Image (spheres, grey):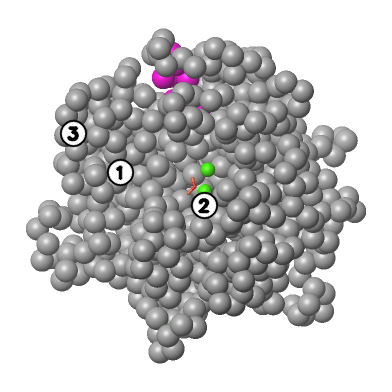
Amino acid sequence: SASHGSGKPLMGFKAIPISTSDSLQIAPGYTASVLAPWGTALIDGAPNFKGDGSEDAAVQALQVGDNHDGIHFFALDGKNHEGLLVMNHEYCTVDEKTGAYVWLFGSKGGDVRKTWSKDNVHKSMNAHGVSVIHIQKNAKGQWDLVKGSAYHRRITAFSAMEMTGPASGDALLQTKGDPSGRRAQGTFNNCGNGFTPWGTYLTCEENFNNYFGTSGAEDRRNAAQKRYGLSAKGSTFQWEKHEARFDYAKEPNESNRFGWIVEIDPFNPGSIAQKRTALGRFKHENAAFALSKDGRAVVYMGDDQVNDYIYKFVSDGKYTKGGDNSQLLDKGKLYVARFDAGKAVGDFAGTGQWLLLDKQANPKLQADSSFANQAAVLVHARMAGDVVGATKMDRPEWVSVHPKTGEVYVTLTNNTSRTVADEANPRAKNVYGQIVRWREAGGDAAATTFEWDIFVLAGNPTVHTAPKDLRAGSANITADNTFNSPDGLAFDADGRLWIQTDGKYSNQGDYAGQGNNQMLCADPVTKEIRRFFVGPKEAEVTGITFTPDHKTMFINIQHPGEEGDSHWPGGGNSIPRSATVVITKDDGGVIGT
Ligand code: FEO
Ligand code: CA
Ligand code: CA
Ligand code: CA
């Protein structure tokens, strides 16, 4: 392995084989344990999970939510043994074919489609959102919830929110329920996350479109509602049947109040979450924070949809350590990325441009009367990206910034509907996905040009033949580390790149020998990739965070048994539950060494 200054290889663990078992598998010398599964009693007075999913809406509001995703550990006073674990509860698993909730209402009698009640809707709304969980290490060295802590908090689809930034109060955000256009209600489909150096959590609203529908027979969607993928008729989650604001025919602007980055202050339980409109509205995956050379806040963001875009926000103001940064994400420039082939064609590398999404400063947007003002550009950021000629990507998922070099990495999870390949998205019908990285001009996160290359083309060399068939993957993909659909992505402080997958787990055909979803670790210099962890059946592995000393890692297992076949983590006949997984090294060392 290459030296990284210290003379030690970056990765010190032994790679593990795939698994198709309903359990956690981890590299030798490491231990993985379960924390805070869905239904765990959180707020004072909450009952414990009954085991059959029969809790009502009021109880769910006091318990940990469903389908854990993005996560961040905020140390209390810099401690390695106590902090606030903040995590997203993205959604509830719904059977794609039948439309039934798979687990939220239990496995027996859980199909409540015929008796769909207001309480069912409210339970679903309360299972979504965010949890703030005060945790500490007990005498045995295990992590526990701190009983009765005032920090414990649930943020749900009911919680009061403020809309801030340039689109706040605009006509596009006004509804019958909120004529001011400044006070949204709730957050949902919170996918990945980010965090700021001033101690706030950024939760990212992704597939908000699946919550809006109508019981009317007519397709009354406008062009923007179609571009953002709202259903013409009923929605996946069926909230519109009991909450009129989710009926797009009754409240046509309500969906404009979702699809944002939401800033939460976990240290102030009474604080109101802020939807930051300056960062644009799309299906946000995560929010990767960086500082420009002159100290401005930069946030990198992917829009997780086939053939959609990568964005970055650059604040006007500068970050001040210990100062008031509470409005820093309200004023700045929003850009969308174009990836060009560069001088050499076919080398999986090139140059790129950040295209400014500004109604006044970009002549293409100035000339387009479909954007009345900058608020319209932000609310309809996807359509602004279309106008300025951004590059259609293979589903941009998580972005992460190398802690030392500032190089930026993004997972492009897959895109089976791609027909025309380009250099950054070099495969039509892309079933495996890739990781692209770029270097900003002058090493400055605020630059408007960059150079990029492909870090890894995921693929399957045991099914397809390299180098002719790109489906075999790039040279750093082998029979031992093959995987599909990279999604979660984060650097640790040493520069190890952690890669999580949310892909196909059939272990057959194109996916033969890939097993369950997993977490791998990569060396960004040598490009070597090793499998570190494998999740249980029908789950994805997502969310990455560490204690400050990097001796505890927290990740999430989401939607175990999404097709009905898992009893993780309870075993026996229990219904499966999303949960956090705590990873430690048995010798007490840094994770990954
Ligand atoms: Fe919620 Fe793009 O994963
Ligand atoms: Ca090229
Ligand atoms: Ca994801
Ligand atoms: Ca997910």
Residue type at tag 2:
Gly
Q: Residues within 10 Å of mark 1 (few under 14, many from 20)?
A: some
Residue at 52% x, 52% y is 194
Q: Looking at the image, is mark 1 or mark 2 earlier in the sequence? A: 2
Magenta stretch, main secondary structure, is helix
Residue at 58% x, 18% y is 106
Residue type at tag 1:
Gly
The residue most toward the top is 115
Q: Residues within 10 Å of mark 3 (few under 14, many from 20)?
A: few
Q: Residues within 10 Å of mark 2 (few under 14, many from 20)?
A: many
Q: In this orientation, which residue lies closer to the viewer: 409 or 468?
A: 468
Q: Alpha-carbon distance for marks 1 and 2?
A: 25 Å
Q: Alpha-carbon distance for marks 1 and 3?
A: 13 Å
Which residues make up the magenta segment?
119-129
Q: In this orientation, which residue lies closer to the viewer: 256 or 197?
A: 256
Residue at 66% x, 54% y is 512
Residue type at tag 3:
Asp
**Residue wearing tag 2:** 194
**Residue wearing tag 3:** 219
The quarter holding residue 339 reads: bottom left
Q: Nearer the viewer, mark 1 or mark 2?
A: 1
Numbered mark located on residue 229 in the image: 1
